[in-house]
Amino acid sequence: MRDLPFPVRDANAMGGADNLGNLPEWDLTDLYASEEAPELARDLDWLEGECAAFAADYEGKLAELDAAALLACVQRNEKINAVAGRIMSFAGLRYYQLTTDAERAKFLSDMQEKITVFTTPLVFFTLEINRIEDDVLGAHFAANPDLARYEPVFRRIRAMKPYQLSDELEKFLHDLGVVGDAWERLFDETIAGLTFTVDGEELNIEGTLNLLTEQDRSKREAAARELARVFQENIKTFARVHNTQAKEKEIVDRWRKMPTAQTGRHLSNDVEPEVVEALREAVVAAYPKLSHRYYDLKRKWLGLDVMQVWDRNAPLPMEDTRTVTWEDAEKTVMEAYAAFDPRMADIAAPFFSKGWIDAAVKPGKAPGAFAHPTVTEVHPYVMLNYLGKPRDVMTLAHELGHGVHQVLAADQGEMLSSTPLTLAETASVFGEMLTFRKMLDQAETPEQRKVLLAGKVEDMINTVVRQIAFYDFECKLHAARREGELTPDDINALWMSVQAESLGPAFEFMDGYETFWAYIPHFVHSPFYVYAYAFGDGLVNALYSVYESGAEGFEDKYFEMLRAGGSKHHKELLAPFGLDASDPKFWDQGLSMISGFIDELEAMEG
């Protein structure tokens, strides 16, 4: 998902010059034909029985298994994950298509509860893996190459060993997970149900955020002030969600004796805290030469003495406001992918023809964009809210990159295909960069080139600077919550403490902007997720520099990296390219690409 303003209107209902063409919708029948499908009932029955049988066969016995028996155990667990994942993918995707539908919300909740109950007996699996002695496990890997393939999974599970609780407490926390899910759903449903009135037109949040990219400054201001008004009306609900989620996390972290609120995320990302801190320090140090410098340029282009928050994503005065049809968007992205390597276009093609993309904007549909991998025996699904802006083309390129990555990694199987968040953005940002470079090469005038460069810089600032500012906000929020309940004003103050620093002196902040933390879903769904965007952007910028240098065999190495899925650590993945994310200079290399684009924009002014 992206932290960018996404459009919202029923695109298929538009006519004339605004017609976007035939926007695809999901066909979920590759998962299940319907919520009443006999295959779904069969899988639920199988899952309930197999979870019970798995526990009966293995609980208390993992340390005694030989290598072959441990492999059989792992493969049975993997099959359980695949069936549960298929059910939850189907329920979740149906829900995201229409989050305001009570029946779909109930179906998702019912499936979550059933699968939580069925899988509770499996909690012992990871706990007992962590009780196997290192030398015993090493001997098993040496004796059985098929088992050794799962070594990265065991390594990540065993990284949690110091923070493991008793079996009984772990089962309790597993069961309690549905309560945390309910708070997330409250957030989602509250956001989806908000209505905003701008110039007499009633809009949802996507439509209102989209107005922040309008040429008409008065419309942008009206949208920003209406966002602030509605967020303020609902601020107690958002503050309650954040307080509860942060407190729940603090309790679990305290019981697990995790040293920081961020430790759990670093462990799940398979990344060292010092690597994340090096990234953060490099980005914060670069604020003046990145966001501060760019927004001062933009302020001049807009003819303003000072920018307001509603000018941050404003189009440039010379920007072409044409609408990009879906057909043109598909052509642009597919040609960019094919120019890099025809194999990439071949993998992407079925997304457009087989109902793997849901592109139109509809009332009640979830905001934003994402690529969901479902399970390795099916295929990913991409969700967009497409309204034909050049940025929407970039979003298509981004999410399709995720899809290509997920297809390539699927051969690793259910337990090894999933990449940590830090690496999950690699193919998406790379796909975006390929598409951007193609559009830049096609620019017919200096003005078009300037607009494209400025748009890319803004996207990169949103992906790097803005996300690291979000990360700092979350760090402050969780630290403050450990000292006690936070009022809405407390959270507002924390938000504002990072905004001026990251955006720079070109901005003034209107009254009400202090509540704009309220609508960011990552804070609720995935604490500290956001630094993965900056990690991915920096990594891809460094990778792209290697590609541009004409490095021999780059394409084959790139595909091998994507095929690896979650089977390799970031050091192993980057080594073939001569890159190392643990080197502090690595991040400067990535940031210099953004700085270079700003240099070019400044040179155009001369």
Image: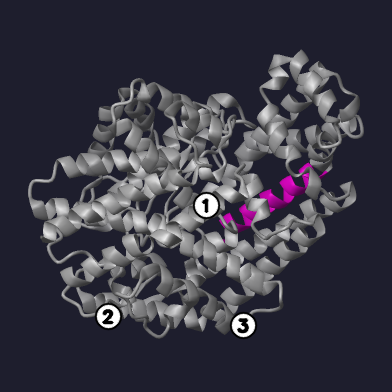
Mark 2 burial class by Cα count in 10 Å: few <14, some 14-19, many 20+: few
Per the model, the C-alpha gap separating discs 2 and 1 is 46 Å
Q: What element carries label 1?
A: helix
Residue behind mark 3: 487
Residue 199 — which label? Answer: 2
> Of label 3 and label 2, which has the lower sequence position?
2
Residue at 33%, 75% (x, y): give it.
Answer: 505
Q: Where is residue 461 in the image (x, y as percent from the top left)?
A: 36, 58
In this rendering, the label closer to the viewer, 3 or 2? 3
Q: Which amino acid does label 1 sit on?
A: Ala
Q: Which amino acid does label 3 sit on?
A: Thr
> In the rendered picture of this protein, how many numbered marks are placed on residues?
3
Foreground: 401 or 545?
A: 545
Q: Where is residue 583 in the image (x, y as percent from the top left)?
A: 50, 42
The answer to whether marks 2 and 1 mark residues whose Cβ atoms lie closer than 8 Å is no
Foreground: 110 or 560?
A: 560
Q: State whether residue 100 appears in this view.
A: no
Q: What residue type is labelled 2?
A: Asp
Residue at 60%, 44% (x, y): give it.
Answer: 271
- Side (left or right) of 329 relative to 500: left
Per the model, the C-alpha gap separating discs 3 and 2 is 32 Å
Residue at 54%, 37% (x, y): give it.
Answer: 33
Residue behind mark 1: 278
Residue 116 lies within the magenta run = yes
Q: Magenta stretch: give its range.
A: 102-120
